[in-house]
Amino acid sequence: MNTLNTTIAAYKGGVIDRRTFLDCLIALTGSMAAAHLLLESTGLASTMISQIESKQKEISSDTVTYTASDGESIGAYLSTPRERERFPGVIVIHENRGLNDHIRDVARRFAAEGFTALAPDLLSRMGGTGSMASPDKAREALSSLSPDEAIADLKAGLEYLDHHDRVIRGRLGSTGFCWGGLRSFVLAAESQLLRAAVVFYGSAPPADTLAQVQCPVLGLYGETDERITSQVPEVAEEMKRHDKHFEYKIYPGAGHAFFNDTGGRYNPDAAKDAWRRTIEFLQTT
């Protein structure tokens, strides 16, 4: 505990940066997933880290809730530029272990680029990411969430964003990572509110769902992530057959989760280019 407290004090005091702080937590807990769960369960991710990172990026960030279609309360993280104006909105969909600081940081990065970003905690129905006993329990709980429930909760998040006083009505996009990448693709087929959807190393939905896609989709993949990337040409052909807009980039040498700068598979060159493409895509479609 003394080592943890010392690490926290060093981060709060500006002695170490966020990446070093997370590296220290990973060393203390044994894995990236365990480090993120520690941040969630102690509240550090939504308090200390949020405040420090938001101040650095001149944005405002806070924990919010919105109501799902069946009345359930869904927790989320909201980041927006400090200017009292309206901005395009983007829903940020987490990976398969729930809402963590990596996804919160992505939301903050969107806000710094001029978006109002909402990152829902899709484990809210099970008590929230921070209530999970371990990273594996978080993954198991998320796998028990039905596809329909997940999409319904995300659609409710889009409604929340569309009516938010910091969002330009009708200017919504989605971005999802891994498990969330598939959900971003499905949202493109199931929500009329979306103007554009971005998929980071996520599987594609079935062909009948692809036929229903209603907005342009951008896919970003790692070359060595063969389970997913091998399907991309077929997905592109199917989208073309249905006259749907689909563009994609496969990064040579990059693997799954190449964008996650808190993990061991992070590829900075691929991540930098993917972020540029994401911002341009959401700004121009």
Image (spheres, grey):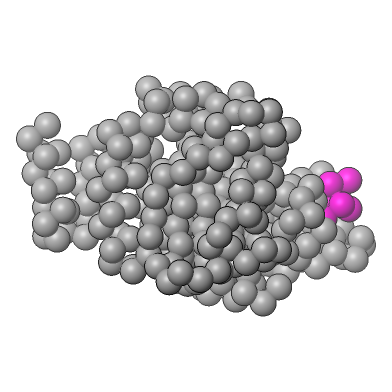
Q: Nearer the viewer, residue 23 or 209?
A: 209
Residue 30: give x, y in percent of width and height: 27, 35
Residue 213: give x, y in percent of width and height: 82, 55
Q: Residue at left 21%, top 60%?
A: 17
In the rendered image of this protein, does residue 44 appear above or below residue 115?
Answer: above
Residue 199 is drawn in which quadrant?
bottom right
Magenta region includes residue 212: yes
**Residue 268 visible in the displayed image:** no
Residue 255: give x, y in percent of width and height: 52, 56
Q: Nearer the viewer, residue 141 or 260?
A: 141
Q: Residue at left 64%, top 28%?
A: 71
**Residue 212 visible in the displayed image:** yes
Magenta region includes residue 162: no
**Quadrant for the C terminus in the image:** bottom right
Q: Residue at left 65%, top 50%?
A: 158
Residue 284: give x, y in percent of width and height: 67, 77
Q: Describe residue 86's horizontal placement relative to residue 203 as left or right.
A: left
Q: Nearer the viewer, residue 95 or 248?
A: 95
Count of labels in the image = 0
In the rendered image of this protein, does residue 173 appear above or below residue 135?
Answer: below
| Region in magenta | 207-213
Q: Nearer the viewer, residue 111 or 69?
A: 69
**Quadrant for the N terminus in the image:** top left
Q: Describe residue 186's horizontal placement relative to residue 58 as left or right.
A: right
Residue 15 is drawn in which quadrant?
bottom left
